[in-house]
């Protein structure tokens, strides 16, 4: 008997269904589930609580607070993980409270732009995670100043 063009298989119809379901689940896992698992391993939930410094070094001139002035060297400030505190305008600029909800006795940073924290986590197996960039606003007490700077009394973080 000569049957050209017919593929003869040894799997029953039920086994074909099971095979295609298995193949679908495997592809679904590779495409949708695995990247999410990998991302959650390499990019942990990040809390800015552990990086906020206790104090911030700033120059004070006429009610304005800044890390940079015309005749003095730039003051370097660091987050608790030793990465530099950077402002989007190139310096840290702060003002006493003057907006709704602010206290006139406190200093709010930044006055312009944002204070940025950035970090690229690396897992224990060496996998590089997604870069974390957080905008942070600080509230300082200008009456609590030491040689280490003004006391940070509150903060707010956003992505």
Image (spheres, rainbow, N blue to C red):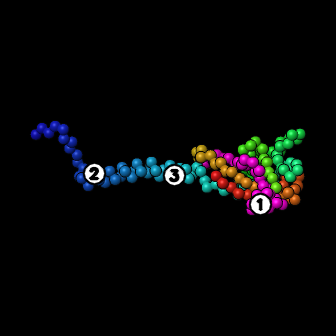
Instruction: Determine which of the numbered discs, if any, sits on residue 16 in the image.
Output: 2
Relative to the observer, which residue lies in front, 141 or 11? 141
Q: Residue at x 70, y 48 (%)?
A: 117
Q: Could you tell me what secondary structure mostly forms the magenta stretch?
A: loop
Specify few, some or many for label 1: CA neighbours under 10 Å numbering under 14, 14-19, or 20 or more: few
Tell me if 93 is positioned left or right of 117 in this view: right
Between the residue at mark 1 and the residue at mark 3, the CA separation in whole angstroms equals 40 Å
Circle 3 is placed at which residue position?
36
**Tag in front: 1 or 3:** 1
Image quadrant where residue 2 sits: top left
Neighbor class of circle 2 (other Cα within 10 Å; few <14, some 14-19, many 20+) is few
Q: If you read the primary sequence from the N terminus, does the residue marked by circle 2 or circle 3 appear first?
A: 2
Name the mark nearer the viewer: 2 or 3: 3
Range of magenta residues: 97-123
Above or below, 71 relative to 151: above
Q: Position of residue 110 (x, y in %)?
A: 76, 51
Q: Is residue 78 left or right of residue 133?
A: right
Mark before the other along the chain sequence, 1 or 2:
2
Residue 102: assigned label: 1
């Amino acid at each position: 008997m000569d049957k050209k063009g017919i593929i003869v298989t040894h799997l029953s119809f039920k086994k074909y269904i099971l095979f295609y379901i298995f193949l679908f689940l495997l592809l679904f896992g590779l495409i949708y589930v695995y990247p999410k698992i990998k991302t959650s391993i390499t990019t942990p939930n990040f809390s800015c609580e552990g990086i906020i410094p206790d104090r911030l070094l700033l120059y004070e001139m006429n009610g304005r607070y800044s890390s940079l002035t015309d005749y003095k060297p730039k003051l370097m400030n660091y987050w608790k993980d030793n990465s530099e505190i950077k402002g989007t305008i190139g310096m840290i600029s702060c003002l006493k409270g003057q907006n709704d909800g602010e206290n006139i006795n406190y200093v709010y940073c930044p006055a312009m732009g944002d204070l940025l924290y950035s970090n690229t986590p690396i897992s224990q197996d060496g996998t590089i995670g997604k870069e974390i960039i957080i905008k942070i606003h600080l509230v300082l007490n200008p009456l609590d100043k030491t040689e280490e700077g003004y006391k940070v009394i509150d903060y707010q973080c956003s992505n």
